[in-house]
Protein backbone atom coordinates (compact mmCIF):
# COMPACT_ATOMS: atom_id res chain seq x y z
CA UNK A 1 0.00 0.00 0.00
CA UNK A 2 1.30 3.43 -0.92
CA UNK A 3 1.60 5.37 2.35
CA UNK A 4 0.16 8.44 0.63
CA UNK A 5 -3.11 6.55 0.29
CA UNK A 6 -3.46 6.05 4.01
CA UNK A 7 -5.08 9.38 4.80
CA UNK A 8 -7.89 8.77 2.38
CA UNK A 9 -8.67 5.32 3.77
CA UNK A 10 -11.41 5.05 6.27
CA UNK A 11 -10.80 2.92 9.32
CA UNK A 12 -12.94 0.01 8.17
CA UNK A 13 -11.10 -0.27 4.86
CA UNK A 14 -7.84 -0.20 6.72
CA UNK A 15 -8.97 -2.98 9.02
CA UNK A 16 -10.20 -5.07 6.09
CA UNK A 17 -6.86 -4.71 4.31
CA UNK A 18 -4.98 -5.45 7.50
CA UNK A 19 -7.12 -8.53 8.08
CA UNK A 20 -6.49 -9.74 4.52
CA UNK A 21 -2.76 -9.33 5.14
CA UNK A 22 -3.08 -11.25 8.37
CA UNK A 23 -4.77 -14.14 6.58
CA UNK A 24 -1.93 -14.31 4.08
CA UNK A 25 0.62 -14.35 6.87
CA UNK A 26 -1.31 -17.02 8.72
CA UNK A 27 -1.62 -19.30 5.73
CA UNK A 28 2.11 -19.08 5.09
CA UNK A 29 2.72 -20.20 8.64
CA UNK A 30 0.16 -22.97 8.80
CA UNK A 31 1.89 -25.09 11.41
CA UNK A 32 2.29 -22.15 13.73
CA UNK A 33 -1.37 -21.24 13.29
CA UNK A 34 -2.44 -24.76 14.15
CA UNK A 35 -0.41 -24.64 17.32
CA UNK A 36 -1.68 -21.25 18.35
CA UNK A 37 -5.26 -20.48 17.49
CA UNK A 38 -5.22 -16.73 17.13
CA UNK A 39 -5.63 -13.96 14.62
CA UNK A 40 -3.15 -11.17 14.16
CA UNK A 41 -5.73 -8.40 13.91
CA UNK A 42 -8.37 -8.34 16.65
CA UNK A 43 -12.02 -8.07 15.65
CA UNK A 44 -13.53 -4.62 15.19
CA UNK A 45 -15.47 -4.75 18.51
CA UNK A 46 -12.31 -5.91 20.29
CA UNK A 47 -10.34 -2.99 18.85
CA UNK A 48 -13.05 -0.57 19.91
CA UNK A 49 -13.08 -2.03 23.43
CA UNK A 50 -9.29 -1.78 23.64
CA UNK A 51 -9.36 1.83 22.48
CA UNK A 52 -12.08 2.68 25.00
CA UNK A 53 -10.23 0.93 27.80
CA UNK A 54 -6.97 2.76 26.98
CA UNK A 55 -8.75 6.09 26.96
CA UNK A 56 -10.52 5.50 30.27
CA UNK A 57 -7.32 4.31 31.94
CA UNK A 58 -5.29 7.21 30.50
CA UNK A 59 -7.78 9.72 31.81
CA UNK A 60 -7.77 8.05 35.21
CA UNK A 61 -11.46 7.24 35.03
CA UNK A 62 -11.07 3.53 35.69
CA UNK A 63 -8.55 1.46 37.60
CA UNK A 64 -7.00 -1.26 35.39
CA UNK A 65 -6.99 -3.61 38.40
CA UNK A 66 -10.76 -3.16 38.74
CA UNK A 67 -11.19 -4.03 35.06
CA UNK A 68 -9.01 -7.12 35.49
CA UNK A 69 -11.10 -8.20 38.47
CA UNK A 70 -14.29 -7.79 36.44
CA UNK A 71 -12.94 -9.82 33.53
CA UNK A 72 -11.65 -12.50 35.89
CA UNK A 73 -15.08 -12.76 37.50
CA UNK A 74 -16.85 -13.45 34.24
CA UNK A 75 -14.13 -15.66 32.76
CA UNK A 76 -13.37 -17.77 35.81
CA UNK A 77 -15.78 -17.29 38.68
CA UNK A 78 -19.29 -17.21 37.27
CA UNK A 79 -20.69 -19.40 34.56
CA UNK A 80 -22.75 -22.51 33.90
CA UNK A 81 -20.32 -24.77 35.82
CA UNK A 82 -21.60 -23.12 39.00
CA UNK A 83 -25.18 -23.90 38.10
CA UNK A 84 -24.20 -27.45 37.20
CA UNK A 85 -22.77 -27.94 40.70
CA UNK A 86 -26.04 -26.78 42.22
CA UNK A 87 -28.03 -29.15 40.01
CA UNK A 88 -25.79 -32.13 40.73
CA UNK A 89 -25.98 -31.50 44.47
CA UNK A 90 -29.77 -31.38 44.26
CA UNK A 91 -29.78 -34.69 42.37
CA UNK A 92 -27.74 -36.51 45.02
CA UNK A 93 -28.99 -34.80 48.17
CA UNK A 94 -32.79 -34.71 48.66
CA UNK A 95 -32.52 -32.34 51.63
CA UNK A 96 -30.48 -29.89 49.57
CA UNK A 97 -32.99 -30.16 46.74
CA UNK A 98 -35.83 -29.32 49.12
CA UNK A 99 -33.96 -26.27 50.38
CA UNK A 100 -33.09 -25.26 46.80
CA UNK A 101 -36.72 -25.33 45.71
CA UNK A 102 -37.82 -23.45 48.84
CA UNK A 103 -35.19 -20.71 48.70
CA UNK A 104 -32.85 -20.77 45.72
CA UNK A 105 -30.79 -17.80 46.86
CA UNK A 106 -29.98 -19.34 50.25
CA UNK A 107 -29.29 -22.78 48.79
CA UNK A 108 -26.87 -21.52 46.14
CA UNK A 109 -25.08 -19.51 48.84
CA UNK A 110 -24.51 -22.81 50.68
CA UNK A 111 -22.25 -23.78 47.77
CA UNK A 112 -20.56 -20.38 47.76
CA UNK A 113 -22.50 -18.73 44.93
CA UNK A 114 -23.98 -15.27 45.32
CA UNK A 115 -23.70 -11.79 43.95
CA UNK A 116 -24.95 -9.46 41.30
CA UNK A 117 -28.09 -10.68 39.47
CA UNK A 118 -28.45 -13.56 41.88
CA UNK A 119 -30.14 -11.75 44.74
CA UNK A 120 -33.49 -13.48 44.29
CA UNK A 121 -33.26 -16.90 42.71
CA UNK A 122 -36.22 -19.18 42.18
CA UNK A 123 -35.51 -22.75 41.10
CA UNK A 124 -38.18 -24.61 39.15
CA UNK A 125 -38.04 -28.39 38.81
CA UNK A 126 -38.57 -30.32 35.61
CA UNK A 127 -40.42 -33.61 36.06
CA UNK A 128 -42.02 -36.18 33.79
CA UNK A 129 -45.19 -34.07 33.87
CA UNK A 130 -43.84 -30.51 33.84
CA UNK A 131 -41.23 -28.83 31.67
CA UNK A 132 -40.06 -25.37 32.71
CA UNK A 133 -38.36 -22.81 30.50
CA UNK A 134 -37.05 -19.37 31.42
CA UNK A 135 -37.10 -16.15 29.46
CA UNK A 136 -36.92 -12.43 30.08
CA UNK A 137 -39.54 -10.79 27.91
CA UNK A 138 -38.45 -7.29 28.91
CA UNK A 139 -34.70 -7.51 28.42
CA UNK A 140 -32.23 -10.24 29.41
CA UNK A 141 -32.53 -10.93 33.15
CA UNK A 142 -30.59 -14.08 33.95
CA UNK A 143 -29.01 -15.68 37.06
CA UNK A 144 -25.43 -14.50 36.48
CA UNK A 145 -23.79 -16.20 39.52
CA UNK A 146 -24.99 -19.61 38.29
CA UNK A 147 -25.04 -19.28 34.50
CA UNK A 148 -22.68 -16.41 33.67
CA UNK A 149 -23.74 -14.00 30.97
CA UNK A 150 -26.73 -14.89 28.79
CA UNK A 151 -26.19 -16.19 25.26
CA UNK A 152 -27.10 -13.90 22.34
CA UNK A 153 -30.22 -15.90 21.44
CA UNK A 154 -31.60 -15.48 24.97
CA UNK A 155 -31.47 -11.71 24.42
CA UNK A 156 -32.96 -11.86 20.93
CA UNK A 157 -36.35 -10.33 20.17
CA UNK A 158 -37.50 -13.62 18.66
CA UNK A 159 -36.80 -15.72 21.77
CA UNK A 160 -38.18 -13.11 24.16
CA UNK A 161 -41.41 -12.56 22.30
CA UNK A 162 -42.14 -16.03 20.96
CA UNK A 163 -41.32 -18.11 24.03
CA UNK A 164 -44.37 -16.82 25.86
CA UNK A 165 -46.64 -17.15 22.81
CA UNK A 166 -45.52 -20.52 21.46
CA UNK A 167 -43.11 -22.18 23.88
CA UNK A 168 -43.46 -25.64 22.31
CA UNK A 169 -42.67 -24.22 18.88
CA UNK A 170 -39.61 -22.37 20.16
CA UNK A 171 -38.38 -25.45 22.02
CA UNK A 172 -38.92 -27.57 18.90
CA UNK A 173 -36.84 -25.14 16.84
CA UNK A 174 -34.13 -25.38 19.48
CA UNK A 175 -34.19 -29.16 19.14
CA UNK A 176 -36.40 -30.13 22.06
CA UNK A 177 -39.72 -31.82 21.40
CA UNK A 178 -41.90 -31.72 24.51
CA UNK A 179 -44.65 -34.38 24.43
CA UNK A 180 -48.23 -33.10 24.46
CA UNK A 181 -48.92 -34.75 27.80
CA UNK A 182 -46.16 -32.70 29.44
CA UNK A 183 -47.18 -29.26 30.68
CA UNK A 184 -44.87 -26.44 29.61
CA UNK A 185 -44.42 -23.61 32.08
CA UNK A 186 -42.75 -20.36 31.04
CA UNK A 187 -41.12 -18.21 33.72
CA UNK A 188 -40.61 -14.55 32.90
CA UNK A 189 -37.55 -13.21 34.70
CA UNK A 190 -37.22 -9.64 35.83
CA UNK A 191 -34.86 -7.48 37.81
CA UNK A 192 -36.40 -8.63 41.09
CA UNK A 193 -36.57 -12.36 40.40
CA UNK A 194 -34.48 -14.71 38.32
CA UNK A 195 -34.97 -18.37 37.60
CA UNK A 196 -32.98 -21.55 37.17
CA UNK A 197 -34.41 -24.79 35.81
CA UNK A 198 -33.55 -27.92 37.78
CA UNK A 199 -33.44 -30.44 34.93
CA UNK A 200 -34.49 -34.06 35.27
CA UNK A 201 -31.67 -36.40 36.21
CA UNK A 202 -31.10 -38.71 33.23
CA UNK A 203 -31.89 -42.37 33.67
CA UNK A 204 -28.93 -44.68 33.98
CA UNK A 205 -26.87 -42.22 36.03
CA UNK A 206 -27.54 -43.80 39.42
CA UNK A 207 -23.92 -44.87 39.85
CA UNK A 208 -22.35 -41.55 38.87
CA UNK A 209 -20.63 -39.40 41.46
CA UNK A 210 -21.73 -35.81 42.04
CA UNK A 211 -18.90 -34.26 40.02
CA UNK A 212 -19.55 -36.63 37.11
CA UNK A 213 -23.20 -35.68 37.19
CA UNK A 214 -22.27 -31.99 37.19
CA UNK A 215 -20.23 -32.56 34.04
CA UNK A 216 -23.40 -33.68 32.22
CA UNK A 217 -25.39 -30.55 33.07
CA UNK A 218 -25.48 -27.94 30.31
CA UNK A 219 -26.34 -24.27 30.36
CA UNK A 220 -29.23 -24.86 27.97
CA UNK A 221 -30.72 -27.51 30.26
CA UNK A 222 -30.72 -24.99 33.11
CA UNK A 223 -32.53 -22.46 30.90
CA UNK A 224 -34.98 -25.18 29.97
CA UNK A 225 -34.35 -25.36 26.23
CA UNK A 226 -32.65 -28.76 26.41
CA UNK A 227 -32.58 -31.89 28.51
CA UNK A 228 -29.61 -33.38 30.27
CA UNK A 229 -28.53 -36.54 28.53
CA UNK A 230 -25.83 -39.06 29.22
CA UNK A 231 -23.26 -39.19 26.41
CA UNK A 232 -24.08 -42.05 24.09
CA UNK A 233 -27.65 -42.30 25.33
CA UNK A 234 -30.36 -40.92 23.05
CA UNK A 235 -32.68 -38.31 24.51
CA UNK A 236 -36.10 -39.85 25.25
FE1 LIG B 1 -34.34 -8.61 31.79
Image (cartoon, helix red, strand yellow):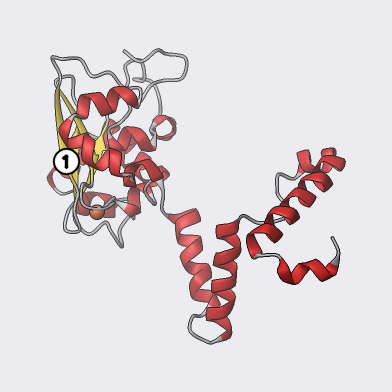
Quarter of the render that holds ligand 1: bottom left
Left or right of 235, for residue 161: left
**Which residue is at a point 75% across and 48% down the rendered structure image?**
20
Q: Toward which corner of the image does residue 188 lie, by quadrant?
A: top left
Q: Secondary structure at mark 1?
A: strand
Q: Residues within 10 Å of mark 1 (few under 14, many from 20)?
A: many
Determine which residue is flagged by label 1. 187
Q: Position of residue 219 (x, y in %)?
A: 37, 38
| Quadrant the C terminus occupies | top left
Q: Toward which corner of the image does residue 235 lie, by quadrant?
A: top left
Give above or below for 95 relative to 54: above
**Which residue is at a point 22% across and 59% down the rendered structure image?**
119
Depth check, front residue: 60 or 13: 13
| Residue 227 appears in the figure | no
Q: Position of residue 64 (x, y in %)?
A: 55, 76
Q: Toward which corner of the image does residue 53 lie, by quadrant?
A: bottom right
* Disc 1: residue Cβ within 8 A of ligand 1's nearest atom: no
Amino acid sequence: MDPSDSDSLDRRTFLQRAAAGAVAVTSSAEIHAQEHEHQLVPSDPALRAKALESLLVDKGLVDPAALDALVDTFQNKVGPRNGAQVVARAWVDPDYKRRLLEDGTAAMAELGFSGNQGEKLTVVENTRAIHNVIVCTLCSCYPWPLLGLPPAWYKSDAYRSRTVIDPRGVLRELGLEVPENVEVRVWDSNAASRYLVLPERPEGTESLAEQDLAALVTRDAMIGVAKVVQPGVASP
